[in-house]
Image: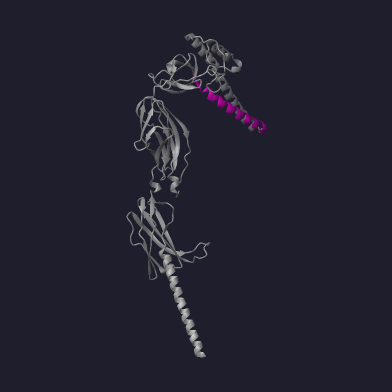
C-alpha cells in the first residue's frame, strides 16, 4: 500500500516538473519574440539638424541590471551623444504591463536629409538581440533657416514659373501677391512706384508671429501672404516686375532684407481696338459719377466757346467753395448746363461744409472734455454721441472733398494711354469728369459710367 502511494507521488512530481519546465520554455520563447519585435521610436514628430534628438525603446519584465546596450557604428554626419537606461514604469492605464527597462539613445544630426541608423546590440543576461531604428527624415535647423519671399499671380498673365517670364499687353492689370516663409516676424514692407506705369497696394494681410520654440514644421514652413499689388505697365518692352522690399526677423533673431524673386515682363503693344459704348437716349445722362447724378432735360446742344468753358469752370469752382444752403451757385450751374446741353450731376462736395463739420467735431470734443472735468456725466455722454456722429460725417465728407474734377476742353477718351492708338469714345466738350489716377501726362478718368485715359492738356482742373 505504501509502495503504491509512493509511486503515485513520484509520477505526480515528475509531471509537475515537466509542466514547469515547459511553461518556462514557452515564456522564454514569448519574451524572446517580444524583444525581437521591438524598435526604437523618435521622441519628436520632427527631427532637426544640429539639435540633440532622442530615440527610445521600452522592454517589459526585464530589470535594467540585466540589460547592456551597444551602438557599435553610426552613419556619416551623425554624432552619438549618450546612451542611458533606467527603470521603465508602465502608464497608469496599463493593466498588463509590468516594470522593465527604458532605454534612451541621444544622437545629433549634423546635416538635414534622410538617415538610416544602424541597429543597436542589446544583451539581456546571456541572450543577444538587435533593436533597429525606423528611417529618419531630418529637417534643416530652424535657427539656420533664412526667410524667403514668393510671388503668386491673381490675374492670368502668360507665366512660366521656371523661366520667370511673363507676357502682358500695355494697359493690362498684373495683380500679384507677395508671401513670406521661415520668418518669425515681419518688420516692414516698402516699394518704389515704377516709372511709366500705375501701381498700388490693393490688399494687406496680417502675418502671424511665430516662436522659434515651435516643434511643428508645418507651422513655420507655411507661406504667409503679406500684401497684394496691382501694376499696370504703360509702355511696351522688356521690364521687371516691380520689386517689393521686405524686412523680416529670422528664427535666430537676426533682421534680414529679403530678396525679391526676379520676373522678366514682356510688355506687348495693346490691341488697337476702339473704346465704344452704346447708350440709349434715355440712359445718356441717367448714369452718374458716384451713383448720385440726377436726370436732366436740356435744350438743343450749343457749341461751347472758350469763354463759355471759362464761365462753366468758374461756376463749378464757386460751387465747390460755397455752402449750398447760403449760395445759388448750384442753381446757376444747372441753368448753364441746361442751356448748353451738358449732362448734370448733383451738388459737388463743398469745402466749407467739410471745414464746418470738422469745426463742429472739434467743438464737441472740447465740450465733452469740459463736461467730464465738471463731472456732468450726462452731458458728457451726450457729447460723446455727437462726437461719434460728427466724426463719421467729417470723415465721409472729407473723402468726397478729396475727389478731383476737371472739365473736358477737347479730345477723346482712350482705352490705353497711347497717342497713336485708334480713336476712342468722343467726349462732349464741357463734360465734367472725375480724375482717378495720374501717370505722367496722362489722366485715368471716369466719364459717366465709363473709364479711360485723357491727356492733361485736354482738360481744365476744378480747384
Q: How many marks?
A: 0
Q: Position of residue 410 (x, y in %)?
A: 45, 14
Identified at 50% across, 88% down, the residue is: 4
Identified at 49% across, 63% down, the residue is: 90
Identified at 40% across, 55% down, the residue is: 53
419 lies left or right of 328: left
Q: Nearer the viewer, residue 248 or 178?
A: 178
Compared to residue 181, the image places residue 332 above or below, namely: above
Residue 33 is drawn in which quadrant? bottom left
Q: Which residues are magenta?
A: 377-404
Q: Position of residue 440 (x, y in %)?
A: 40, 22
The verdict on residue 388 being magenta is yes
Identified at 67% across, 32% down, the residue is: 378
Q: Main secondary structure of the magenta part?
A: helix
Compared to residue 71, the image places residue 222 above or below, namely: above
Q: Position of residue 291 (x, y in %)?
A: 55, 23
The verdict on residue 430 being magenta is no
Is residue 161 in sight in this rendering? yes
96 lies left or right of 166: right
Residue 385 is drawn in which quadrant? top right
Is residue 463 in sight in this rendering? no
Q: Nearer the viewer, residue 341 or 257?
A: 341
Furthest residue in direction left, as rendered? 76
Amino acid at each position: 500500500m505504501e509502495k503504491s502511494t509512493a509511486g503515485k507521488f513520484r509520477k505526480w512530481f515528475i509531471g509537475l516538473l515537466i509542466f514547469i519546465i515547459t511553461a518556462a520554455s514557452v515564456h522564454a520563447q514569448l519574451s524572446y519574440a517580444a524583444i525581437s519585435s521591438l524598435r526604437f521610436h523618435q521622441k519628436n514628430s520632427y527631427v532637426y539638424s544640429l539639435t540633440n534628438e532622442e530615440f527610445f525603446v521600452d522592454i517589459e519584465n526585464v530589470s535594467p541590471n540585466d540589460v547592456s546596450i551597444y551602438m557599435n557604428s553610426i552613419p556619416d554626419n551623425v554624432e552619438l551623444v549618450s546612451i542611458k537606461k533606467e527603470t521603465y514604469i508602465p502608464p497608469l492605464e496599463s493593466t498588463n504591463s509590468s516594470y522593465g527597462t527604458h532605454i534612451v539613445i541621444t544622437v545629433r544630426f549634423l546635416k538635414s536629409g534622410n538617415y538610416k541608423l544602424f541597429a543597436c546590440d542589446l544583451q539581456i543576461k546571456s541572450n543577444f538581440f538587435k533593436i533597429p531604428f525606423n528611417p529618419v527624415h531630418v529637417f534643416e535647423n530652424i535657427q539656420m533657416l533664412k526667410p524667403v519671399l514668393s510671388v503668386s499671380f491673381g490675374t492670368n498673365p502668360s507665366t512660366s514659373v521656371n523661366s520667370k517670364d511673363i507676357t502682358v499687353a500695355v494697359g493690362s492689370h498684373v495683380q500679384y501677391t507677395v508671401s513670406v516663409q521661415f520668418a518669425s516676424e515681419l518688420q516692414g514692407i516698402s516699394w518704389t512706384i515704377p516709372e511709366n506705369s500705375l501701381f498700388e497696394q490693393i490688399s494687406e494681410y496680417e502675418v502671424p508671429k511665430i516662436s522659434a520654440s515651435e516643434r511643428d514644421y508645418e507651422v513655420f514652413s507655411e507661406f504667409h501672404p503679406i500684401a497684394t499689388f496691382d501694376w499696370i505697365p504703360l509702355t511696351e518692352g522688356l521690364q521687371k516686375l516691380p520689386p517689393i522690399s521686405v524686412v523680416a526677423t529670422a528664427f535666430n533673431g537676426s533682421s534680414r532684407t529679403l530678396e525679391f524673386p526676379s520676373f522678366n515682363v514682356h510688355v506687348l503693344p495693346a490691341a488697337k481696338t476702339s473704346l465704344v459704348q452704346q447708350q440709349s437716349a434715355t440712359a445718356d445722362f441717367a448714369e452718374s459719377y458716384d451713383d448720385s447724378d440726377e436726370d436732366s432735360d436740356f435744350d438743343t446742344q450749343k457749341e461751347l466757346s472758350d469763354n463759355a468753358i471759362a464761365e462753366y469752370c468758374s461756376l463749378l469752382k464757386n460751387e465747390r467753395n460755397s455752402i449750398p444752403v447760403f449760395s445759388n451757385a448750384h442753381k446757376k450751374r444747372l441753368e448753364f448746363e441746361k442751356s448748353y446741353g451738358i449732362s448734370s450731376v448733383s451738388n459737388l462736395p463743398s469745402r466749407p461744409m467739410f471745414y464746418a463739420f470738422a469745426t463742429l467735431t472739434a467743438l464737441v470734443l472740447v465740450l465733452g472734455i469740459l463736461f467730464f472735468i465738471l463731472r456732468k456725466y450726462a452731458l458728457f455722454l451726450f457729447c460723446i454721441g455727437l462726437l461719434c456722429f460728427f466724426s463719421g460725417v467729417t470723415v465721409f465728407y472729407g473723402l468726397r472733398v478729396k475727389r478731383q474734377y476737371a472739365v473736358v476742353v477737347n479730345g477723346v477718351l482712350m482705352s490705353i494711354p497711347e497717342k497713336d492708338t485708334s480713336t476712342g469714345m468722343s467726349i462732349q466738350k464741357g463734360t465734367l469728369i472725375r480724375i482717378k489716377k495720374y501717370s505722367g501726362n496722362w489722366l485715368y478718368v471716369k466719364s459717366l459710367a465709363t473709364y479711360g485715359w485723357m491727356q492733361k492738356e485736354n482738360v481744365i482742373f476744378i480747384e
